[in-house]
Amino acid sequence: MREPIALKPMGVTFIAFGDEADLLASHSVCYSRQHTDLPFQVITNTPENRRHAKWKEVSDVHFTYIAESIRFNRTVKCQLPTYTIFEKCLYCDIDAVIQNPGLDKALADFDGDLMLNYYDTYTADHILGIYYRAHKQFNCTLPLDVYNGAVFAFNRATAPAFFNMWFANYVAFGKKRDMPPLACTLQQYKQQGGVIQRFSSSVFAPNIFAIAVVDPNALIQHVVEDYDLIGTIGLPRMPRLQRYEGGTPPDDWKWVNSA
């Protein structure tokens, strides 16, 4: 597709493919609007006449419609410099909310190519099967640093080289999970001289392997089981978002010894 013209110097981009994702995004983005003046972009395959009525309550939100299947969601994520309308972009999953003010300054102060939230480090005796397969396929070395793909920032003008590598690895990995190719891409990117900046822990409270990380002071909070985020944003239930991996082998999410 044609690269869009940037409408704003910086803002937050969300991806919501499918009706259930549209439902969740409309509520989480509406809640997030209370805590930031940054413009929002929603990349979606839901046409305007099917979008949830909650969107009418969100100000300064720009929709980018793409007539593709739900599985195209992760292709967009791995090629965000092509799709975002912001020169300086914060990407945020739709199952996370901005819950405190301060994100505007955090994004304004960001001046690198890429910034992510640190997640974990895998070693020979501490690695999930799916990451073991990825590190073998892409000839990565251990230890392998893993970053959370739910929230990250990038400069559209300088980050395409990284995203091109990530997308190529995502395709080579079967267009299923994007996180294992992300970890390997980041290692390759650093080996080629790329610099990866990290968010401070005060920016994002993630959900790590279903272990609750609840921080009411963090700027962004991920959905966790014992944190009533769904009730907070006004939903009676958690939508059953479609899985994109399409039949993941059971050993993918088991700890393996790679020695």
Image (spheres, helix red, strand yellow):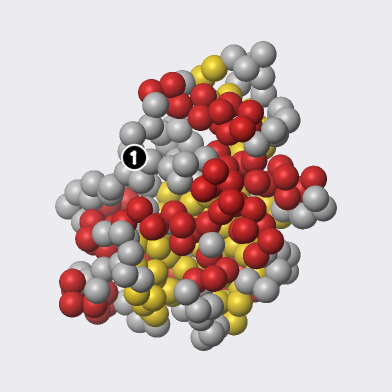
Residue 18, above or below 129: below
**Residue drawn at (59%, 82%) of the image:** 9
Which residue is denoted by mark 1 in the rendering? 246
Residue that appears at 71% across and 28% down = 142
x, y (%) of residue 140? 70, 34
**Residue found at x 71% / y 55%:** 197
For residue 216, say whether it is visible: no
Residue 131, position in %: x, y?
Answer: 56, 31
Judge left or right: residue 212 versus residue 257.
left
- In the picture provided, is 105 more to the left or to the right than 29? right
- The C terminus lies in which quarter of the figure? top right
Quarter of the image holding residue 194? bottom right
Determine the image quadrant of residue 109. Answer: bottom right
Kind of element beneath mark 1: loop
In this view, which residue lies farthest toward the right? 193
Task: Report the amino acid beneath label 1.
Answer: Gly
The percent coordinates of residue 151 (x first, y second) are 52, 55
Q: Residue at x 18, y 77 (%)?
A: 49
Task: Give left or right: position of 62 versus 206.
Answer: left
- Rendered position, 181 above or below 141: below
Q: Could you tell me residue 159's position as x and y percent? A: 67, 64
Total residue callouts: 1
One can see residue 66 in this view: yes
Position of residue 181 relative to residue 136, above or below, is: below
Label 1: few (<14), some (14–19) or many (≥20) C-alpha neighbours in 10 Å: few
